[in-house]
Image (cartoon, grey):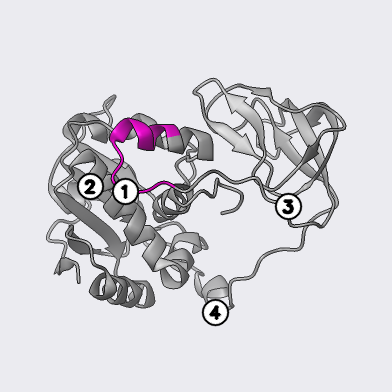
């Protein structure tokens, strides 16, 4: 059993708002995978990790997990389904700017061919974990898409799992914590052990009792020697913003123009840590 404590946050945001959340619209339904579409578009220059280059050509067969794009940052993106590369062509992005990007177009074949990485065995060092994150396409899955390995400093003292998810309608993190808590906890523990991080903080709004219960159950079943500090936050937007979350949970103010890592703090989304756990087992990011 991992050691943990649950405490009510004793700090409160000045300002902020209490919008209607509407989260029950999705949390009341089971999580399901969408059907495989007839075409998949992978933007080469609008992918997380910066501008990229195509690693495949028209006519190439790909499996689920085959590298297809390498970004300027080094991050590799993989095919999310097996199929064939139909074309590489300009296409409008699903973005308010309506900009266009060269895209790799894949026609899925419905087969379950996989091209995964070799599983890693503990112990491994920080550089080995960074390389795995690059190969597996590990990005911040909270929305920004920042390459996760760039946050991993050897001077880090604290890892914060940002489970606040304060935005209306959004329940991706809440749902993931409920159904795959162990992957999130394992990813956090392995990252912390690799970087010699002493404390893992989970910042979670108090409107997620099912997720909190799942976290407690997972920690009781865990064999980790990490310590988890679970901080219950008021349900208020924007408590899940990185700067606000660092202040609410730790009392540390991150100056404008600085990043939390400069204060010795890494902030990661639950989905990012779950994806890291799977990547250590060999599975690159193919879904969210």
Closest to the observer: 161 or 184?
Answer: 184
Note whether residue 248 is visible. Answer: yes
Look at the image and tell me in which quarter the C terminus lies.
bottom right
Q: Are marks 1 and 2 in contact (CB under 8 Å)?
A: yes
Q: Secondary structure at mark 1?
A: loop
Where residue 87 appears, as percent x and y from the top left, is 86, 31
Q: Which residue is mark 2?
A: 193
Disc 1 versus disc 2: distance between alpha carbons?
10 Å
Q: Which residue is mark 3?
A: 113
Q: Which residue is mark 1?
A: 122
For disc 1, the neighbor class at 10 Å (few under 14, some 14 to 19, many from 20) is few
Q: Is residue 156 left or right of residue 97?
A: left
Residue 86 is one of the magenta-drawn residues: no
For disc 2, the neighbor class at 10 Å (few under 14, some 14 to 19, many from 20) is some
Q: Residue at x 21, y 34 (%)?
A: 254
Q: Secondary structure at mark 3?
A: loop
Disc 1 versus disc 3: distance between alpha carbons?
27 Å
Q: Are marks 1 and 4 in contact (CB under 8 Å)?
A: no
Q: Are marks 3 and 2 in contact (CB under 8 Å)?
A: no
Where residue 27 appears, as percent x and y from the top left, is 52, 74
Where residue 241 appears, as percent x and y from the top left, is 34, 46
Closest to the observer: 242 or 286?
Answer: 286
Mark 1 or mark 3, which has the lower sequence index? 3
Q: Residue at x 43, y 55 (%)?
A: 274
Disc 1 versus disc 4: distance between alpha carbons?
38 Å
Tell me which corner region of the image, top left, top right, bottom left or bottom right, holds residue 131. Answer: top left
Q: Residue at x 61, y 49 (%)?
A: 286
Q: Are marks 1 and 3 in contact (CB under 8 Å)?
A: no
Check the image and report above or below for 168 versus 65. Answer: below
Q: Which residue is mark 4?
A: 28
């Amino acid at each position: 059993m991992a050691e943990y404590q649950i405490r009510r946050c004793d700090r409160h945001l000045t300002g902020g708002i209490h919008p209607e959340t509407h989260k029950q619209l999705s949390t009341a339904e089971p999580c399901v995978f969408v059907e495989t579409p007839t075409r998949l578009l992978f933007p080469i220059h609008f992918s997380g990790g910066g501008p990229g280059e195509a690693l495949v050509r028209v006519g190439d067969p790909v499996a689920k997990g085959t590298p297809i794009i390498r970004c300027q940052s080094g991050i590799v993106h993989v095919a999310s389904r097996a199929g064939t590369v139909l074309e590489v062509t300009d296409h409008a992005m699903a973005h308010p700017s309506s900009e266009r990007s060269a895209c790799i177009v894949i026609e899925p074949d419905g087969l379950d061919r996989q091209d995964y990485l070799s599983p890693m065995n503990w112990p491994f060092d920080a550089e080995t974990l960074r390389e795995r994150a690059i190969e597996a396409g590990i990005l911040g899955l909270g929305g920004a898409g920042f390459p996760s390995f760039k946050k991993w400093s050897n001077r880090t003292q604290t890892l914060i799992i940002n489970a606040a998810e304060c935005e209306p309608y959004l329940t991706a993190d809440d749902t993931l914590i409920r159904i795959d808590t162990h992957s999130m906890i394992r990813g956090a523990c392995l990252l912390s052990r690799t970087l010699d991080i002493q404390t893992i903080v989970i910042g979670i709004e108090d409107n997620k009792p099912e997720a909190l219960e799942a976290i407690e159950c997972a920690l009781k079943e865990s064999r980790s020697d990490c310590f988890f500090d679970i901080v219950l936050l008021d349900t208020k937007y924007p408590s899940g913003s990185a700067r606000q979350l660092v202040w609410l949970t730790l009392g540390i103010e991150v100056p404008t123009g600085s990043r939390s890592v400069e204060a010795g703090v890494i902030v990661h989304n639950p989905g990012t840590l779950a994806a890291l756990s799977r990547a250590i087992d060999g599975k690159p990011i193919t879904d969210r």
